[in-house]
Image (spheres, coloured by chain):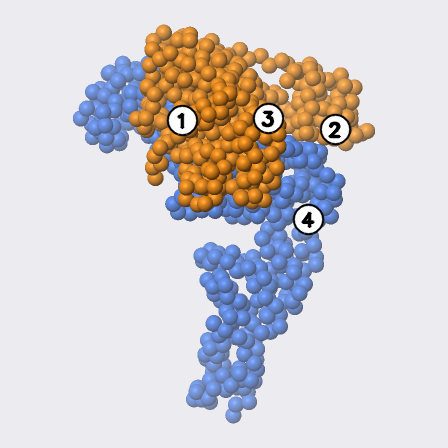
Amino acid sequence: MSENEFSGYKGEALKAIRKAGANIGDLIRIIRNGQVYEGILIPRSEYGDKEHVVIKLKNGYNVGFKITSKTKIEKVGEGVKPSFTPPPPPKQNPELPKVTIISTGGTIASRVDYRTGAVRPALTASDLYSVVPELGEIARIEAKILFSLFSENITPKHWTEIAKTVAEEISKGVNGVVIAHGTDTMGYTAAALSFALQNLPVPVILVGSQRSADRPSSDAATNLIGAVTAASKAPFAEVAVAMHETTSDTTIILHKGTKVRKCHTSRRDTFKSVNSTPIARIKDGKIEMLTQDYRKRNSKNRLVLKPKFNEKVALIKFYPGINPSIIDWFVDNGYKGIILEGTGLGHVGRYCFESIRNAVEHDVIVGMTSQCIWGRVNMNVYNQGRDLQALGVIPLGDMLAETATVKLMWILGQTQNIEEAKKLLKTNIAGEFNPRTIF
Amino acid sequence: MEVNYEKLGLKVGLEIHQQLDTSTKLFCNCKPQLFKGEPEITFLRRLRPTQSELGQVDPAAYFEFQKGLKILYEANSETSCLVEMDEEPPHPLNMEAVETVLTVALMMNAELVDEIHVMRKTVIDGSNTTGFQRTCIIAMNGEIKVGEKTVPIQTICLEEDAARKTGREGNLIRYRIDRLGIPLIEVTTAPVIHSPKEAEETALTIGKILRATGKVKRGLGTIRQDLNISIENGALIEIKGVQELELLPLVVKYEVQRQLNLIKISEELKKIGVKEEDVKEEFFDVTEVFRNTNCKVIRKALSQNKIVLALKLPKFKGFLKRELVPNFRLGTEMADYARFWGKVGGIFHTDELPAYGITKEEVEALRRKVKTENQDAIVLVADSPENAKDALKAVAERARQAIRGVPEETRAANPDGTTRYMRPRPGAARMYPETDIPPIKITKELLEKIKTALPELPEQKLKRLIEKYGLNMKLANQIMDSEYAELFEIIVKETKVQPTTVAVFLTETMKALKREGVQIEKVSKDKIMEMFRLLGKGELFKEAMQEIFVWLSKHEKESVQNAIKALNLKALSKEELEKIINDTIRSNEKIVKENKAKAFGLIMGIVMKEVRGKADASTVSQLIRQKLSEHP
Ligand SMILES: [Zn+2]
């Protein structure tokens, strides 16, 4: 946001501000009903109406005044530009591991401009150190801004970019990589990187926050400290998501990239490992492994980068009464893969069979997952399931629907050969299948 | 001695916080009430001071954070949801609360804002799970009449109440979040109050206006008064959390006294030539002096491998025991600093020694070890080396301030009207917009709605109560302040009961019952109304009211009729009463024959005992007289 734009102001309000010759951040005076109010002109929400001007009073409060023929606005003084120079970064301890933090958006760390209320993300390493000084005791940080995107705007093209950037950092010999990511689609990106980055030598940790970083109660700093701790010294070399384990700030939990899902709209512990135990827990700076089933950190591993994804894959959730021509549309539009989110053990209504048959006949790969989220599909228990298999639908075990979709995109980015693709879809590549579900 | 406050340049401003009586909290649909007993949910958090572009951080809060302060929150599911846990964004502002604040604003002739913007005020002591308090200005520049004086009202705000502290063990503070989110109105006066009495009268006036809306909570803990007080050559002191109105004048009086005494101490210290740089942060480990002490506190500390650390305060001898306000000395001030900054239990100082098991010999050994002159004072702390050092550093700082004069502080009110050090005064409040709540326009329609239902101003109402119902000033005042003010007028309108009778029952009788432990809130207003209806119809007697009320308070689900039945308090018919009187006369035939006049008292006593609450005394006495005169 530029200081000289009339951010958010329109119509009458904008006219009045212009007339007064005032800019955002300037000290202005509003005269109304014989009363005088002085304050700093504050940016207005884009969704605000055209009639009100917002000022920040000397006591810190914002108030809105309606612009009418009886309201007068005068500029009193120029705004003072905020000048914040972060303290010099701490002396880097050459003994500490090196970690690169790649930012894709979402504010894992930020500062508030209390003058105008604007929240500014901390993006450089020294910014990060100034906001989360503890990082300096864990690792030597390098910070990189790749994108500034809300996670819902991230697409498979961005996964490719992220994967390439991580590979580049790893080739420089860092001890781990942290990716700051908005939480909404972080699970998808984690799955995508799990397939795109194979034979990892070091951990790749995705991290986000559920409470914005500008508030003292934010989970951002604790999550980031956890992520950097894992990246710098965890014994595993996996793609993982680091977030709060519970509503308390006590522990950070690391979920396997292919087995993790966002399960709550707002809670800190929104991410859950589905059909698998988390990899590790961090408590008081110490890493406690929760499974023995992980790829070990080994700097001798040669990273295999396979960053391509084919976007012609759809995820379709079955619901009672779904119009099967939705499936036809994807086939007609050249889609190569469809992941169905069926009911229960992996079913869809018989009225969809014709469209599914048509899809398979057009060489579209159709995989079945369950909308139950927890558990595995089993298409041998009921006739409906056996019939679907006969049509050519591939049951995908305990794989998450989202992971299955990402995986099929990735597979079709690697090969055009249908049979090979089908085989890959059924092969456990990055821990996306768990042969055993424990209670 | 009469203090001339005007001459001292006393300036007091009040900030009155009062909980609103809404059906839900300010930003969610939880019940605005507290819970007792064990919490169903607990969770642990840390709050991180966020840096602003201005680089300001509340120094006390930052200090606590660095010390590793953790907060354990307690909740139950009835009074808290994810919003209070800071696990869900706030819901839109509770309009019921907004309407009440608008009502107060109009009653105080304040200028309303056109658009309400909710702000986040940074608070990182843990009392808010978010790390900030949500607050908004709804009106400014109002005024109230306090006697002949006009007191300007600077702001009228609506904000959320904070969580309540339930304990602290070392670096772990416990807060209960049931209170968090209860709507509060905050009324701030200009600092134009110039005497303790005026402070009380101003608070009283504001309280009356708030209660006139009928939409504020009542009872202890629902109102909190903060003050800012300054005198010339003193300092601006913020005093938090005066819960009782009656305490206000005393708090002001003590604070003035405290500042005057501190000024005097400062002058005397300067006169004897003590300089700030003389107070050095040089600490002496004097553990060995107390190796075999009889002082229990020190012995316990030493058994836990703690140390005894000493600080020399040059030429301070005698000053530490100087009383600032009753039972509160300069040494007490220093102890409070030590407790806050060093988390220690307390301090010892040579102005009070030998005592507490510390002997004269030990004091002498101590003086030798610290190499003090006779006019110096020594302060001791027994704790871990780190805490002891932090504590003595704070004591040294407080000593330097004593040379300077009165330090600016935020203080907390004690129940006896004195105050204690809480923390240094924070810098300008750091506020930024609450972006999760869209601004609220105050529309013409909303304003019209409120204007048409505006309650009477207290002084108008008082006048009306006296003129229309013939109440005396005291009763009128009491009824106006009571939560039954509205009910009073309804009862009087709908029954034939004397207004004074109704008013006495609703105020004095109720108060007396409450004092006796009767849960008066358990009897609904409808039931009270019904009791008076029966009283008006003569089906119930005045004497029975109290008993029925008490029974109803214990039987919340029962009706008034059932109470009458259960207590056998139905009014007697004339025939029933006559029978009882006749029977009594008959069974006392002998005395009646001997002396009718003497018998009257006896008969009256016996009959009244039997018919108490079922007949009124004047009817009974009249009937007895009649029957006796008819008696042969
Ligand atoms: Zn709630």
What amino acid type is highlighted by mark number 3? Gly
A430 or B400: which is nearer to us? Answer: A430
Q: Nearer the viewer, mark 4 or mark 1?
A: 1
Badge 4, how many Cα within 10 Å: few under 14, some, many 20+?
A: some
What amino acid type is highlighted by mark number 2? Lys
Badge 3, how many Cα within 10 Å: few under 14, some, many 20+?
A: few
Among the chains pictured, the one given blue colouring is B
Badge 2, how many Cα within 10 Å: few under 14, some, many 20+?
A: some
Pointer 2 or 1: first along the chain: 2
The answer to whether mark 2 and mark 3 are in CB contact below 8 A is no
> Residue at 41% across / 44% down in the picture?
A381
| Chain for disc number 1 | A
Q: With respect to residue B458, does A419 lie above or below? A: above
Residue under label 2, please give it. A50
Q: With respect to residue B199, does A157 lie above or below? A: above
x and y percent of residue A136 in the render? Answer: 41, 14
Does the numbered disc 2 mark a residue whose Cβ is under 8 Å from ligand 1?
Answer: no
Residue under label 1, please give it. A427
B594 or B255: which is nearer to us? Answer: B255
